[in-house]
């Protein structure tokens, strides 16, 4: 192994374990997201679309406001487009790389105010913004593949082949540190909106202690340890944020919205 290869390998190893590098360009996040979105939209059995334009617009409006936050970096690069899934048994939402957001009707019907929904949506946006999927892929690929990509004659092809190895729902299974970072950035996004920045805590309270297959599916991609609740409370205390008003929660508006869901 020549000195250049050794140097690149050492640098790749150091940066990978320091979490300071993502070998995938942002365009690869967008490509993966578009691919995943296409697969979801052609699989109506597993992801039945909820055809309610008014409900879709309601949720999309919240997303559109959240991505105006100064902390959102890829606004205009990622679409941040909402798709509702008709499944009342699943209390969940997820976001692909590149900002395609999916929300189950089970989540919409389980929560009680706009601030909660905004907190969950902000959390999902953060997974795309912080590029958690391709960061994780970089780590899992390992130093050898990273070195081959760095030295290869056709690096774009190598990236595409590597990315294809990680497509599927497994791409969305986030680590504890990913979840904590997504909570932190959701908090930041909401601080620039009319919604209470601790809104996601009502979601945690809603599902905590509940069992059954719907919660099992939720926990497969969104672990909910008690310390995430504690961390949200700590953020609120540190920022000296008072208890929410009705205007910040949007309970009445959300109650009217829920009545429109079938």
Image (tube, helix red, strand yellow):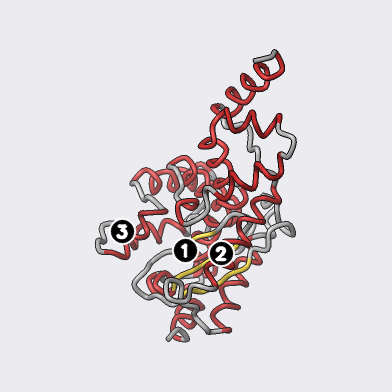
Q: Vertical placement of 45 versus 78: above or below?
A: below
Q: Is 203 in front, or is 233?
A: 203
At 52% from the left and 68% from the top, the residue drawn is: 40
Q: CA distance from mark 1 to mark 3?
A: 13 Å
Q: CA distance from mark 1 to mark 2?
A: 7 Å
Relative placement, left or right, of 230 versus 123 is left
Numbered label attached to residue 238: none
Numbered label attached to residue 101: 2
At 59% from the left and 47% from the top, the residue drawn is: 163
The percent coordinates of residue 247 (x first, y second) are: 54, 69
Label whose residue precedes the other's in the sequence (3 or 2): 2
Relative placement, left or right, of 159 versus 196 is right
The kind of secondary structure element at disc 1 is: strand
Q: Are marks 1 and 2 in contact (CB under 8 Å)?
A: yes
Relative placement, left or right, of 211 versus 193 is left
Indicate the quadrant where residue 239 lies: top right
Task: Look at the image and tell me in which quarter the C terminus lies.
Answer: bottom left
Q: Are marks 3 and 2 in contact (CB under 8 Å)?
A: no
Q: Vertical placement of 144 versus 57: above or below?
A: above
The kind of secondary structure element at disc 3 is: helix
Residue under circle 3? 216
The percent coordinates of residue 159 (x first, y second) are: 65, 43
The kind of secondary structure element at disc 2 is: strand
Task: Look at the image and tell me in which quarter the N terminus lies.
Answer: top right
The percent coordinates of residue 183 (x first, y second) are: 50, 49
Residue under circle 1? 93
Q: Is 258 in front, or is 162?
A: 162
Label whose residue precedes the other's in the sequence (1 or 3): 1
Q: Residues within 10 Å of mark 3 (few under 14, many from 20)?
A: some
Q: Is 235 in front, or is 65?
A: 65
Q: Residues within 10 Å of mark 2 (few under 14, many from 20)?
A: many
């Amino acid at each position: 192994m020549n000195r250049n290869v050794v140097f690149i390998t050492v640098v790749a190893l150091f940066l990978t374990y320091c979490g300071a590098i993502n070998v995938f360009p942002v365009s690869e996040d967008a490509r993966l997201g578009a691919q995943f979105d296409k697969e979801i939209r052609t699989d109506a059995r597993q992801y039945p679309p909820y055809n309610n334009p008014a409900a879709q617009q309601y949720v999309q409006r919240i997303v559109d406001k959240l991505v105006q936050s100064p902390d959102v970096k890829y606004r205009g690069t990622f679409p941040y487009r909402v798709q509702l899934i008709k499944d009342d048994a699943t209390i969940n939402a997820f976001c692909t790389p590149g900002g395609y957001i999916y929300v189950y009707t089970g989540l919409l019907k389980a929560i009680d105010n706009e601030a909660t929904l905004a907190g969950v949506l902000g959390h999902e946006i953060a997974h795309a913004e912080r590029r958690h999927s391709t960061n994780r892929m970089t780590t899992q690929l390992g130093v050898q593949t990273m070195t081959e990509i760095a030295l290869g004659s056709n690096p774009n092809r190598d990236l595409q082949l590597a990315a294809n190895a990680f497509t599927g729902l497994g791409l969305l299974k986030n680590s504890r540190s990913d979840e904590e970072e997504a909570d932190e950035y959701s908090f930041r996004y909401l601080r620039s909106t009319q919604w209470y920045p601790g809104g996601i805590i009502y979601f945690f309270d809603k599902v905590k202690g509940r069992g059954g297959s719907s919660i099992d599916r939720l926990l497969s991609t969104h672990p909910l340890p008690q310390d995430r609740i504690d961390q949200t409370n700590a953020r609120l205390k540190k920022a000296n944020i008072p208890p929410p008003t009705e205007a910040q929660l949007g309970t009445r508006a959300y109650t009217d919205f829920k009545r429109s869901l079938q």
